[in-house]
Amino acid sequence: MTTPISRSTSVREDEGLRLPRPPGVLRRFWARHPVVADVVITILCLLLSLVPAGAITRDLPMPLAIGVAILVPAAVVGTCATMLWRRRHPLVPFVASFALEALFLFALQPIGAPVLLVSCYSLAVYRSSRAAWTGFGIAIASLAALAGALTLTGVITLQIAANAVVMSLVLGLIGTLIGVNVGERKRYLAAVIDRSRQLLVERDQQAQLAAAGERARIAREMHDIVSHSLTVIVALSEGAAATPDPVQARTAASSAAETARSALTEMRAMLGVLRADDSPLPLAPLEPTPPQETVAVAQRAGFPVTLSVTGTASISTALSHALGRIVQEGVTNAMRHAPMATSIEVRLIYASDSVIVEIVNDGVSGPVGTTGFGLRGLVERAAHSGGTITSEPVERGRWMLRAELPVSPADPADLEPKDAP
């Protein structure tokens, strides 16, 4: 089902495109009132065609003259009336006008109806240039064949046939040439405006997609920062409250404060992209969080986290940032969902074409959710880097988070060497 487009919607689209007003008062008036224009054209064609059509009744016997005097004006009126459909059905007035020209072959002098010029013009403008030239060629050939047959049978003279065909050829050719020129320009402008509207819609859609992507990126970063930091702070605070040793309690409280300050710094850097001033926004990703730092913070919180690195590689800052966030979120999930784990292993495996991250713990008990914001953010982050990520149980009651990210060629200025600690 086609949805109707209101005039107000069209006006809003044209305002968005900033289209100039059509030149000329009369042209704007005819463009806004096409029915009035068609009625005026129909009346002019009728007035210009009825007077010459009276020549057909000249020198005819009385009974035949009366019949022709009724038939010809009726044919002229009917043909001119089809001009009212020239925009929607341009082929109807085109066929009717050539039929009227065939009737004018019986005149004793050449007669050219202006309705033929208008119908050829309308076919070229409102259908297509190909249809106009094809229809014009077929119609002129048919008219010439009819005129030749009437000449050979002695119904009309050769002079009358030649004059009628030439007159129709000239009027039709003028109308077709003008119509082809106007029609092609009209279709070209319509295509340009339609393309401009499409670009306007695509621009708005791209802006919406960019805004949605930025919101998703900020949500991922905020979740990673807040989730990891709060998990570590809670663990350190609980440890400080549980230990009777004031030195250990003071150390745990200091570590919690340090973690909070680090998280606050990262949050300020992230929220900086939402400011409303005119200063340039940072296009590069945030400073990547090294896996060594994430492991060290978890160890200070009392969790049995170890880190092993295999191989070396030079990777881009963006990929290093993704690796740091994946390790951070994986360790945070292990700290949160496996508080009784005796081992949390973080493995980084650098190959020539990929980097593999494995985070394995042995403290998961019961079902583990797979629809949280953290795992969703990891999946989005891995997909953005062209990699894959899985989170599933493995042998001997252990749980593994595994990510594999491809190493793509990068700008040497953006490369960061990674070596084993």
Image (cartoon, grey):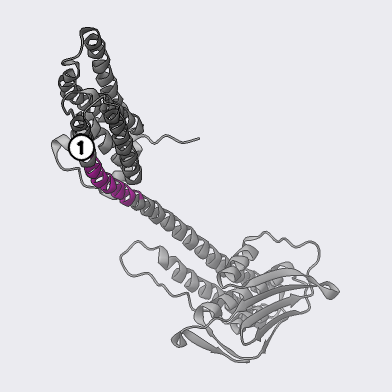
**388 on left or right of 156:** right
Q: Is residue 240 visible?
A: no
Pick the front one: 356 or 127: 127
**Magenta span has 272?**
no
- In the rendered image, the quadrant that contains the C terminus is bottom right
Pick the front one: 395 or 412: 412
Which residue occupies the extreme right position in the image? Answer: 396
Q: Secondary structure at mark 1?
A: helix
Local packing at callout 1 (Cα closer than 10 Å; few below 14, some 14-19, many 20+) is some
**Magenta span has 181?**
yes
**267 on left or right of 307:** left
Residue 261 spot, x, y in % from top left = 51, 74
Q: Which region shows up in magenta?
A: 175-194
According to the picture, the residue beneath numbered tag 1 turns out to be 166
Dominant secondary structure of the residues highlighted in magenta in the image: helix
Pick the front one: 82 or 223: 82
Q: Residue at x 41, y 66 (%)?
A: 273
